[in-house]
Amino acid sequence: MHDDFEAQLRAALSRQEPSPGFAERVIAQAQPRRAPSRLWALAVAAVLVAGIFVYRDVQQRRAEAAREQTLAALRITVEKLNRVQAKLASRQGAAERENP
Amino acid sequence: MKTALLTAAFLCAMQPLAAQLQLSALEGLAAKAKESAEINLDAATLQLANGFLGNPKGKDGKALELLSKVKAIQVRTYEFRSKGEYDAAIVPAIRRQLQSQGWTVFVNMNDAEDGETFELYSRTENGRSTGFAMVAAEAKELAVIYIDGDINLSEIAGLGGQFGIPRIPFLPKDDPKKSNDKKGKE
């Protein structure tokens, strides 16, 4: 029984020759993979272009918000001036009626 | 020398603050108001907006050139549901602040019965208008407008009819800039 186990173990651990081309395949796998430089350049360019578009979009939104606020401020100013003008006119009219 | 430089730098840093109106007394009014608008525009924002308002070489050119001289705009308007929702002491406080900064009132309408106050202010330096301010207080409405820059009331009125701003048939006779212009021509 004991001898039988030893024989099995020996057989399992016995030296076995690798399949043909094993060493070449290992060496090929171990080689550092070099990414094509053109791919890198394209990736960098794509990121730059995307960044420019995002920046321009943010700037555009900011400018549009500033434009809307400026117009709102001017519109309110002019409306209030119109109100003052109307008050002035009504006062002047009342004064003229009192002292024709 | 170093102290003088530091003082100059400090004064330069304080300059934008000095040009603004302190409107902390109006804080919290927007929450009480039925409708409100609170707008703060500094020179950089106005410059950014100017590039998107129209074509400088087109029909908007003159208005854009005018707006390019504006350094800051502060607008506060509040419309309330009922009377007495804002502190009446706000108006004299803003008036004091404007007067202490060298602003002069050229339209002053007060109606104690209706509780209405309309005041238009201007500021001039060396004969040039350097700003326009307005305080309009009614029973249910309050508005404070402050425009800092080389612009006068006639020029603001001239913006009416452009960029969707309503036209204004308003040129008060006692606008100091207008009278200065007249004096200059005579």
Image (tube, coloured by chain):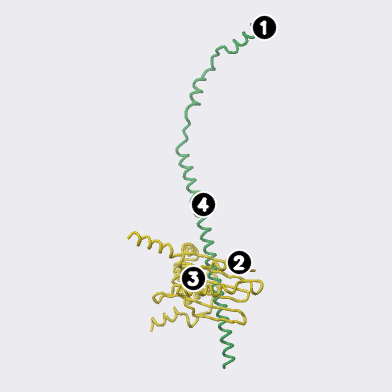
Chain colours: A green, B yellow
Residue that mark 4 sits on = A54
Residue that mark 3 sits on = B147
C-beta proximity under 8 Å, tags 4 and 3: no
Q: Residue at x 52, y 66 (%)?
A: A70
The chain that hosts pointer 1 is A
Asked where in the image residue A86 lies, by quadrant, the reply is bottom right
Please name the amino acid that badge 4 sits on: Val
Please name the amino acid that badge 3 sits on: Ile
Q: Residue at x 51, y 60 (%)?
A: A63
Q: Relative to residue B177, is residue A24 depicted above or below?
A: above
C-beta proximity under 8 Å, tags 2 and 1: no
Q: Of residues A33 and B117, which is closer to you in this image?
A: B117
Please name the amino acid that badge 1 sits on: Met
Please name the amino acid that badge 2 sits on: Ala
Q: Residue at x 60, y 76 (%)?
A: B138
Q: Of residues B99 and A76, which is closer to you in this image?
A: B99
Residue that mark 2 sits on = B30
The reply, left or right, for residue B152 in relation to residue B114 is left
Work out how far the residue at label 4 is from the one at label 2, CA to CA, in angstroms.
34 Å
